[in-house]
Amino acid sequence: MPQIVLQQVCKTFVLRKRQKGMLGAMRGAFTREKELVRAVRDVSFSVEEGELVGYIGPNGAGKSTTIKMMSGILVPDSGEINIMGRTPWKERAAHVSQIGVVFGQRSQLWWDTPVLDSFELLRDIYRVPQAAYKRRLDDLTALLDAGSLLNTPVRQLSLGQRMKCELIGALLHAPRILFLDEPTIGLDAVTKLALRAFLADLNRREGVTMLLTTHDMDDIEALCSRVMVIGRGALLFDGDMDGLRARYAPHRVIRARLARPCESLDLPEAESVSLDGLNAEITFLPARVDPARLIARLAEACPLADLTVEAPDIERMVARMYEEMAL
Amino acid sequence: MSETFRQSPLGLWTRYMRIHALSQLQYRGWLLAMLPSLVYVVTDPLDAVLMFDRFGALGDWTASRILLVYGLALLCFGLAELFFRGIDYFPQLVRTGEFDRLLLRPRALLFQAAALRFHLNRLNRVVAGLLLALVCLRAEGAALSPANAAMLILAVIGGTLAYAGVLLIAAAASFFTVGDSELINLFTNGSYQVAKAPPQLLPGWLRRAFTFLMPMFLFTYYPAAAVCGWEESRVLGWLALPLCAAFFGLSALLWRFGVRHYKSAGS
Amino acid sequence: MKTRMKPYLAIFRQKLLSGLQYRAGYWGTTTTHVVWVYMRVVVVAIFYRYGSGQAGVTLSQAATMIWLQEMALNLMPGFGVDFSVWNKISKGDVGYDLVRPLDVYSHWYMSALSDKLARFLLAIGPVVAFALLTPGEIGLHLSPSPLHLLAGLLTLATGLILSCAVICLCYAAQMDVNVGDAPARVLMIVSQILAGSLLPLQLWPDAMQAFLRWQPFAAMMDLPLRFFAGSAALEELPRVLLSQAVWGVLIWRLGRAWIGRSLRRLILQGG
């Protein structure tokens, strides 16, 4: 049985609307309109132990709600969730001692005291034996190069340093599953790379299952073998990165610089051809045309000075995808 | 510290308190920061003193009698705040979503909530209440036999539980409403305002509200009366702890209900 | 002038709006205050009925003053602090206010004024309704004459000018003392008590009456409320206004100088 199974999970929120202006506020003191928001509808998927899954979607699509339901914080209106044989919200304590959660925008460390104090408290909260704790802490601090941070009060840490400590805190009890909600938000490029390397390594060595939400597509490309896309509460895609491209950005673009001006280009296999002086731009579907043949045809028609074949920029692809969802 | 103790609820609670205290001691001037609350606690019963000064005793009721009841209430509230302070922060916690963090940890929620906050200045109320009660017991000429001392201690434990119950009910309410309601102040700070007058002379509904609804007179007046010999049944003095514990139990049920609502409705 | 007032009108409007918007908070707060003040009045009434001493004011006058306090407290320092300024100072985050094209003291003074006024207006309705509904001597009683009412309103308004100066003095204390906000908080608690919040000042010991009447804080609340309740004669009016004017100017100048000094030091140290 897969480690994580969601079956037709639904969650609806009731929002109370505020009215604008002085009159609205006065009316609001007595009545208020309600609005139903279907945050998650009929989401089903399963994750095997040791998978590294990216969970993406625009803001408000239902990512956090799904993660909250999987961590036992929220109870779905309908549907089943089974994680390591348990229903999260029914056996909360047993469930959460097997998972780790990192919220990029929130801290689980105690603000005013040295990091080590927080870790020791977490050790006791999760009932980690001292010997195991010591070994674990040494390992994690070595891997993240965080040894020098342990005696610093949390409030004096930079965002990147703090995130390293948040990760250590979430992993002290050696969880089998790690949920990461926007772990790289606001971090500089170097720290991002270090965190990604750490997560990939942890996944490889310990087989920890990871599910991460992010807006940074580089995170997904670097880490995740599998991507799930959620939009307006519904699961729209579940597969690998190539599959995502094939589905949402199947086109390739040939940019060619011609050796001499050319009257016209006639390439019926291409989806579109545009010609601007010496620059030609040809869009095609690799699924329908063999790229090598297309390039040969192009070279036949016109001598070439330079040529590149480009896949669409993934960030742009996702932006387009999100735009489509909003329609 | 042995590992078993460290991981037990009591050990963990001590650890929580240690980390809270440490973070407050990190700031220079923490001693001075306790001053405003001290001024507030000390001046609060001043109106009762001034009224006795102007109007004299109310029948059998002298200033020391009133202040004994008041002091016991203050002590219990102070202890409740000391041990269960975190519960008071619940409305805030629910609004900011920080409550999620508690749900992610494999420990009893009530325990985590109680240990969430600690303020050194809450000691003011405990010390002031204790001193006031002791001075007034002396002034009333109470015989502190072992039985009497036991009754008072049990009553104070009961009172602490009762105030903790009130905080729990407020926490439960915060799962349902957005703005943090001040109503609960009536049963915390408000309760020892009521203790500034003899219960027999209060309007009936007010006396009943603070005996049966929020059992403040149960854990202050009746034990004090039994110990000082104010012609009340001694049995009532012994009832404080069981009845207050029942009150706490009911509040805890309400709170659980609130948690379930939170998890099903979301934030 | 009109454009200079604009920011403060906006603050005032914002306070009113947010006060109304938190519906649950609004009704909860109002109910709490009404029941709270009722309990206070009941306790005082018990002393009048069963005690043997004499007081310079009647029970109905004392009750009226206590009911009115519940609204007037909204005009006092510390009662629902304007946390936007308070927190800014606590975090040492006053830099923003320095770059605005406004005088810092006037800015804080005016935002305190609009904050207090908005809170006051929001509290009037329910408290007056409940107070009038409370039967007998412990309810709210009408002023003995329209002139008493006018004198009360006038001195409450001029008292607000003094009260906001005290609030700014609290800000000054908070800014200067770098050990936290404790001294400012103590100043607030003491000023409230001496304004009569614990007990109308006329119920304090007779020997203290002269001192109580002339200390600055009485003029913010207790003295104006005496006119409403009829526990002070109209002849007292000039004396109250004089006390407000003298203390108002003194505290205003003190707060202004103090804040100015702290700001200059802040600029020199580079925040």
Image (cartoon, rainbow, N blue to C red):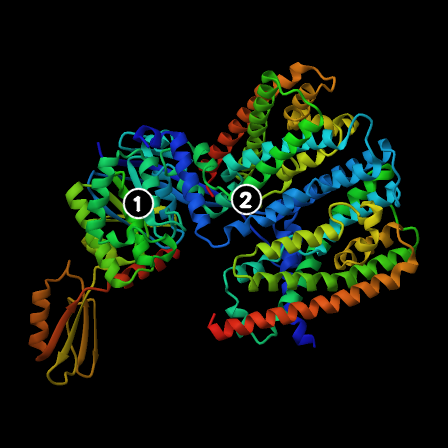
Q: A150 left or right of B9?
A: left
Quadrant containing the N terminus of chain C is bottom right
Which chain does the numbered disc 1 sit on? Answer: A
Q: Is residue C138 left or right of residue A94?
A: right
Residue drawn at (62%, 69%) of the image = C258
Helix, strand, or loop for circle 1? Answer: helix
Using the image as rendered, state which of residue C87 and residue A200 is in the foreground: C87
> Identity of the amino acid at label 2?
Asn
B214 shown above or below A199 = above
Local crowd size for mark 2, using a 10 Å CA cut-off: few (<14), some (14–19), many (≥20): some
Find residue C243 and report its horizontal and vertical position in percent: 81, 63
Quarter of the figure with residue C141: top right
Circle on res. B121: 2
Q: CA distance from mark 2 to mark 1?
A: 30 Å
Residue beneath label 1, please?
A169
The correct choice, above or below, for B229 with respect to C115 in the image is above
In the foreground, A134 or B183: A134
* Residue A311 visible (yes or no): yes
Q: Residues within 10 Å of mark 1 (few under 14, many from 20)?
A: many
Q: Relative to the observer, which residue lies in front, C149 or B32?
A: B32
Please provide percent x and percent y for residue C167.
66, 61
Left or right position of C261 against A270: right
**Viewer-proximal residue among A102 and A318:** A102
| Residue at x 93% of width, y 54% of height | C145
User: At which x and y percent is residue A105?
Assistant: 38, 53
